[in-house]
Image (cartoon, helix red, strand yellow):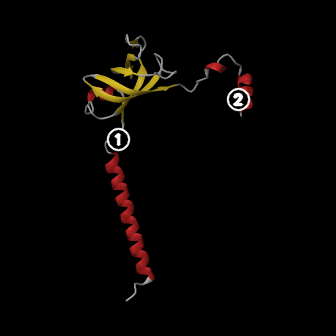
């Protein structure tokens, strides 16, 4: 006995819904340890994440806190949100925009009261101007941009 077309469509829709739900559950299960949570210093000190969990720490680099180690690669600095401060250690190449008093997002792990960063993302404000264009007037900057396009 043949199945009616209406029932075939219902079965097909049901199978598609089950497949989508299954794919979503598999994706969530596979990414559960890959998710990188964002913290500010106040939050990370109030409720520290597990030592092996990768997280992001965001805030401002405290002025006067940046110290380069003798190896020339490792830098120690403090990230603050105005309420709390967290010491950070990073070994690697720093972004060009990474300076004291600027915004930063550090990716890494919180271990024994120090955030050990694997990656630094420097943030700039909305007034950012490339070094090459700092001494140009607004009209000169527009001409330079127009010439490169």
Quadrant, the C terminus: top right
In the image, is residue 136 above or below residue 9? above
Crowding at mark 1 (Cα within 10 Å: few <14, some 14-19, many 20+): few
Question: Which x, y percent locates residue 10?
Answer: 41, 75
Question: Which x, y percent locates residue 63?
Answer: 43, 13
Outermost residue to the front: 71
Q: Quadrant of residue 59?
A: top left
Q: How many callouts does the rendering have? A: 2
Q: Is residue 82 visible?
A: no
Quadrant, the N terminus: bottom left
Disc ID at residue 63: none
Crowding at mark 2 (Cα within 10 Å: few <14, some 14-19, many 20+): few
Going by the image, does 30 lie left or right of 128?
left
Q: CA distance from mark 2 to mark 1?
A: 39 Å
Question: Which x, y percent locates residue 136?
Answer: 70, 18
Disc ID at residue 34: 1
SS for dot 2: helix
Q: Nearer the viewer, residue 47 or 35?
A: 35
Q: Mark 2, mark 1: which one is toward the viewer?
A: 1
SS for dot 1: loop
Residue drawn 38% across and 69% down?
Answer: 15
Going by the image, does 96 lie left or right of 37?
right
In the image, is residue 19 above or below residue 128? below
Q: Mark 2 sits on what residue?
A: 145
Q: Is residue 135 visible?
A: yes
Q: Quadrant of residue 52?
A: top left
Residue drawn 33% across and 55% down?
Answer: 25
In the image, is residue 77 above or below residue 5? above
């Amino acid at each position: 006995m043949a199945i009616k077309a209406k029932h075939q469509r219902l079965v097909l829709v049901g199978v598609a819904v089950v497949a989508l739900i299954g794919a979503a559950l598999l994706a969530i299960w596979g990414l559960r340890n890959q998710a990188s949570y964002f913290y500010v210093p106040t939050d990370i000190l109030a409720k520290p994440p597990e030592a092996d969990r990768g997280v992001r720490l965001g805030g401002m680099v405290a002025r006067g806190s940046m110290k380069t180690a003798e190896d020339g690669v490792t830098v120690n600095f403090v990230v603050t949100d105005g309420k709390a401060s967290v010491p950070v250690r990073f070994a690697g190449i720093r972004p060009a925009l990474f300076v004291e008093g600027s915004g930063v997002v550090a990716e890494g792990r919180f271990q024994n009261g120090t955030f050990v960063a694997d990656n630094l993302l420097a943030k700039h404000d909305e007034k950012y101007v490339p070094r090459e264009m700092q001494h140009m007037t607004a009209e000169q900057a527009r001409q330079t941009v127009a010439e490169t396009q």
